Amino acid sequence: MKTEVKETVKEVLMNLHQLVKGAEECISRVQTAFIYNSSRILHDCQPKVEHIKKLEPQLTKELAGLAREYPDLRPYVSVPVHLLRIGESVTVLSEQVEKKIRENILCSAGAIDELTFLFQRLMEMLRPTADMILVRNEILSKYVQESAQGVERRATEYATRHEERLIEGVCLPLASALYINVLDAVKSIAWHAKEIARKLMG
């Protein structure tokens, strides 16, 4: 691989790495806003998501071009699109938590514990996802895929518990829609991170 090509590849991969780190940081902000009921910390999230949207077409085009000459880069071609979908789901998380705060929607203690746990697991999963972009590693890939499956499984379990709380009258209908929207976004982020990990080692 020519020196100038190596530099281009390095720059593209660093961009992808930083986009994942940005998504992780946003989820951290969402968690903090959710726990402390303050939306002020969320204001920096949308610019990060817009940055992903802006870079995705350019990064996809660059990687597709490079992969034609260097087949080793083919697994990276779909990564920007997966990051775009992660960014869109991060926006849903941010918007739903902001709505909760703005409209003073009360969640049950169970829902608060469950979402706080899921946000933490997402962050723990995105860190090695970012690292995998720079260092394609079987152990990291397996960890991310297993973590993602765990998040998806747990979110599905929580949805069932939520239905029970709703029937028992512990959860208000207004909070119910918000909770389900957040669970769907969490599962989406986990799934796309899993796909990145799977394809990079495919």
Image (cartoon, rainbow, N blue to C red):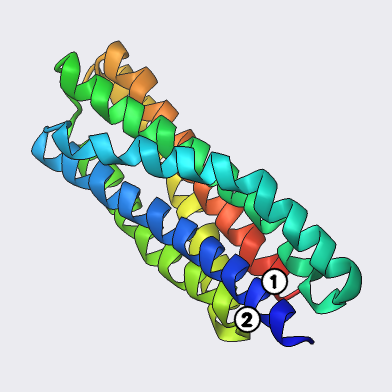
Measuring from the top left, give residue 44's x and y in whole percent.
27, 40
Regarding mark 2 in the picture, which secondary structure is present there?
A: loop
Measuring from the top left, give residue 22's x and y in whole percent.
39, 54
Measuring from the top left, give residue 17's x and y in whole percent.
50, 66
Q: Quadrant of the N terminus?
A: bottom right
Q: Amino acid at mark 2?
A: Arg
Residue in the image at 28% along x and 19% along y:
175
Regarding mark 1 in the picture, which secondary structure is present there?
A: helix
Residue 176's image quarter?
top left
Q: Is residue 11 at all visible to an observer of this figure?
A: yes
Q: Which residue is mark 1?
A: 200
Q: Contact (CB < 8 A) between labels 2 and 1?
A: yes
Q: CA distance from mark 2 to mark 1?
A: 7 Å
Mark 1 burial class by Cα count in 10 Å: few <14, some 14-19, many 20+ = many
Q: Amino acid at mark 1?
A: Leu
Q: Which residue is mark 2?
A: 136
Residue 164's image quarter?
top left
In-front residue for pair 39/8: 8
Q: Quadrant of the C terminus?
A: bottom right
Number of marks drawn: 2
Residue in the image at 45% along x and 62% along y:
18
Residue in the image at 64% along x and 53% along y:
80
Mark 2 burial class by Cα count in 10 Å: few <14, some 14-19, many 20+ = some
Residue in the image at 25% along x and 26% along y:
98
Q: Is residue 68 left or right of residue 38?
A: right
Identity of the residue furthest to the front in this view: 4
Mark nearer the N terminus (2 vs 1)? 2
Q: Is residue 160 at all visible to an observer of this figure?
A: no
Q: Is residue 68 left or right of residue 193?
A: right
Judge whether 71 appears above or below 124 on screen. below
